[in-house]
Image (cartoon, helix red, strand yellow):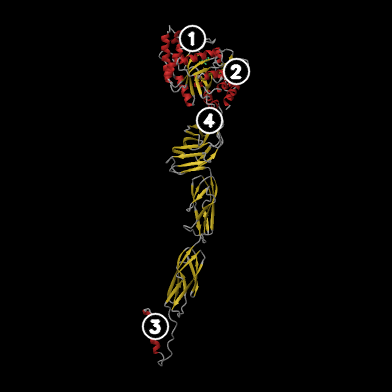
């Protein structure tokens, strides 16, 4: 048995004393309980779970015969206190941490380590209601406290969401909005719970490095290039219902994107139209607009994607965007019918009258210069051309997606004085006309789809050719030459023979037919027949006109109504008959696919050639002199509108 040296010494002394006892001397010295030689505490470690939890410790004294009392102490009463009498003690947890509990007896001591682990009693959130947009992250600011109110760092918390489809939550407590709706996020630790409500709006979230907003059930997609925004930006998107002036919104496609964000580089904005398009709307008419203050600014449309029903634009800024279509118009119906609806355009009105321009652009998809391309106006001196007005009209047409019907190359009216003075000869006229056609047609090649090459060359009584300045001096084959020169100058333009009073089969239409056949047989490049259609209230019937159109088409010619108007005698009503006349021209044309267009010779009574040319007549057009649509407009439009 091993014994510590000191103990061994004392024990030896005790034995020595005992040995000399009974040696006849006095009572031996009293011998007390042995001194404490060691104190141990069990268990050596004590884990207390939760504030207020208690645990027991026991001290063991050596030798067991030692009779010393035991005192207990803690080195950290903030963590654990100890009460005890004798060898047993009760330790009470005060707060999380570690304390050393010591039992002391007879100058000796032993200890145990007590670890207090606190439990989460309360969970609180700095904010417990969130409104987010899809893809937006939102960390939860969670505080866990123990029973004593102390904050627990890094508590073990689990997070759950009531609707993954609305918002998810990570194990670190970061919510991510997914799609519109509401969800409840629950954080749990021990027996504590706390919830946060999440409302996800239509919208999206753009991150600093780029991103995509998809909202409104996929109707809106905003693709933001990298670096386009300087910080993560949440955008909410709402529907709005105020349409652009003079336009129809496609349902659900006007969106308000808040807050308005200006992008460093343009983002791609795609707006989907989820509704079927109205019968008269064609995709190419779809427009994008952005609300600027209280006015809609039309934005350039980059792509109309029919398959996915998306209209795409480049956007520098968010705000309110909409897909819209123009109101029902002549051109929308004509386009559906696969044809052109045109009008002669007055250069003066185009220059000076904004209402005129607005109506022209909205209603027509084809224009014919009423005067400015005629020989005299465009070629006023032998080597002088005046293209300014024609150029303006072509710019307008291009800007508004309109075709241009050129009018006119060879005609006996509106010639410049220089052409007719002196004694023109066949040679001089041929040279002049060739130069004229080469110059004018070449200049506008590719921009003028169809040309009136020869105009009004049939005699009024229907017997053959008109004896005009051109045909009389140069010979009738100048007509042939005009077509040939025009073809050479623009091989793609369709070349027309144009005349009036040829809208029903009869002597004059027969003469025109015969001329067209002769020209073609001679190899002259003639493509089409222009029916002017300057009507009075009782024009040829629909059946007569249809038969006439059919004859030219059957012979292989394109046809177009080139100068339709219906003049009324002053003091008469005639508006209903006028409406019928306008409608029937369209109906007749539409009986044949190769009747490509119906062009009116001016669209408003405000700028009309009729009163000047036919005193006592007027009111021949679709809109009146203050731009109010007349029954003629409705009659004309309805004939276009039928499928
Ligand atoms: O509408 C045109 C009018 O302004 C001119 O003064 C006139 C000159 O003759 O020409 C009018 O247009 C005609 C067209 O060029 C050819 N067909 C008959 C049209 C009405 O006269």
Q: Residue beneath label 3, please? A: 11
Q: Earlier in the sequence, mark 4 or mark 2?
A: 4
Q: Earlier in the sequence, mark 3 or mark 1?
A: 3
Q: Are marks 3 and 2 in contact (CB under 8 Å)?
A: no
Q: CA distance from mark 3 to mark 1?
A: 159 Å
Q: Nearer the viewer, mark 2 or mark 1?
A: 2
Neighbourhood count class around disc 1 (C-alpha, 10 Å): few under 14, some 14–19, many 20 upward: some
Please give the label number shown on residue 282.
4
Q: Nearer the viewer, mark 3 or mark 4?
A: 4
Q: Earlier in the sequence, mark 3 or mark 2?
A: 3
Q: Quadrant of the C terminus?
A: top right
Q: Is residue 260 visible?
A: no
Q: Are marks 4 and 2 in contact (CB under 8 Å)?
A: no
Q: Nearer the viewer, mark 4 or mark 2?
A: 2
Q: CA distance from mark 4 to mark 2?
A: 31 Å
Asked if residue 287 is positioned above or below residue 148 in the image, the reply reads above
Q: Quadrant of the N terminus?
A: bottom left
Neighbourhood count class around disc 3 (C-alpha, 10 Å): few under 14, some 14–19, many 20 upward: few
Please give the label number shown on residue 348.
none
Picture quadrant of residue 586 = top right
Q: CA distance from mark 3 to mark 4?
A: 117 Å
Q: Residue beneath label 1, please? A: 468
Q: CA distance from mark 3 to mark 2?
A: 148 Å
């Amino acid at each position: 048995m091993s014994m510590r040296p000191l103990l061994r010494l004392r024990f030896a002394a005790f034995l020595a004393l005992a040995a000399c006892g009974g040696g006849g001397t006095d009572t031996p010295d009293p011998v007390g309980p042995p001194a404490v030689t060691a104190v141990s505490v069990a268990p050596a470690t004590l884990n207390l779970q939760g504030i207020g939890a208690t645990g027991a410790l026991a001290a063991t004294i050596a030798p067991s015969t030692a009779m010393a009392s035991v005192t207990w102490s803690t080195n950290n009463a903030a963590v654990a206190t100890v009460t005890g009498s004798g060898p047993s003690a009760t330790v009470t947890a005060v707060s999380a941490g570690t304390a050393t509990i010591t039992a002391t007896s007879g100058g000796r001591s032993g200890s145990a380590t007590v670890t207090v682990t606190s439990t989460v009693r309360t969970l609180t959130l700095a904010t417990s209601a969130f409104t987010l947009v899809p893809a937006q992250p939102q960390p939860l600011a969670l505080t866990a406290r123990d029973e004593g109110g102390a904050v627990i760092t890094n508590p073990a918390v689990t997070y759950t969401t009531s609707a993954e489809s609305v918002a998810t939550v990570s194990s670190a407590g970061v919510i991510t909005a997914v799609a519109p709706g509401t969800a409840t996020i629950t954080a749990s630790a021990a027996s504590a719970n706390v919830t946060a409500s999440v409302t996800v709006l239509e919208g999206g979230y753009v991150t600093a490095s780029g991103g995509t907003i998809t909202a409104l059930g996929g109707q809106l997609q905003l693709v933001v290039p990298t670096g386009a925004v300087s910080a993560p930006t949440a955008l909410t998107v709402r529907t709005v219902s105020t349409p652009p002036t003079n336009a129809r919104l496609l349902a659900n496609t006007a969106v308000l994107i808040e807050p308005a964000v200006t992008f460093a580089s343009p983002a791609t904005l795609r707006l989907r139209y989820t509704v079927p398009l109205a019968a008269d709307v064609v995709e190419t008419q779809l427009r994008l607009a952005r609300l600027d203050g209280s006015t809609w600014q039309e934005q350039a449309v980059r792509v109309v994607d029919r398959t996915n029903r998306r209209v795409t634009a480049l956007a520098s800024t968010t705000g309110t965007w909409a897909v819209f279509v123009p109101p029902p118009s002549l051109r929308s119906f004509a386009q559906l019918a696969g044809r052109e609806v045109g009008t002669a355009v007055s250069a003066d009105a185009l220059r000076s009258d904004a209402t005129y321009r607005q109506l022209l652009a909205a209603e027509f998809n084809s224009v014919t210069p009423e005067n400015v391309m005629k020989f005299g106006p465009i070629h006023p001196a032998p080597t002088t051309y005046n293209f300014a007005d024609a150029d303006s009209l072509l710019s307008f047409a291009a800007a508004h997606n309109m075709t241009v019907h050129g009018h006119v190359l060879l005609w006996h009216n509106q010639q410049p004085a220089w052409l007719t003075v002196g004694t023109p000869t066949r040679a001089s006229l041929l040279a002049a006309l060739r130069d004229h056609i080469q110059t004018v047609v070449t200049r506008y090649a590719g921009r003028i789809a169809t040309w009136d090459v020869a105009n009004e060359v049939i005699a009024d009584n229907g017997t053959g050719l008109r004896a005009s300045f051109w045909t009389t001096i140069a010979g009738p084959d100048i007509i042939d030459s005009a077509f040939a020169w025009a073809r050479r100058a623009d091989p793609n333009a369709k070349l027309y023979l144009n005349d009036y009073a040829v809208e029903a089969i009869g002597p004059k239409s027969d003469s025109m037919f015969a001329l067209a056949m002769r020209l073609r047989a001679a190899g002259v490049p003639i493509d089409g027949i222009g029916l002017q259609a300057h009507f009075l209230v009782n024009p040829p019937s629909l059946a007569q006109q249809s038969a006439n159109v059919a004859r030219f088409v059957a012979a292989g010619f394109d046809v177009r109504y080139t100068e339709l108007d219906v003049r009324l005698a002053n003091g008469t009503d005639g508006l209903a008959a006028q409406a019928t006349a306008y409608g029937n021209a369209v109906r007749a044309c539409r009986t044949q696919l190769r009747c490509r267009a119906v062009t009116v010779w001016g669209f408003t009574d405000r700028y009309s050639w009729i009163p000047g040319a036919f005193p006592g007549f007027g009111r021949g057009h679709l809109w009146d002199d203050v731009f109010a649509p007349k029954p003629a407009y409705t009659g004309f439009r309805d004939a276009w509108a039928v499928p």
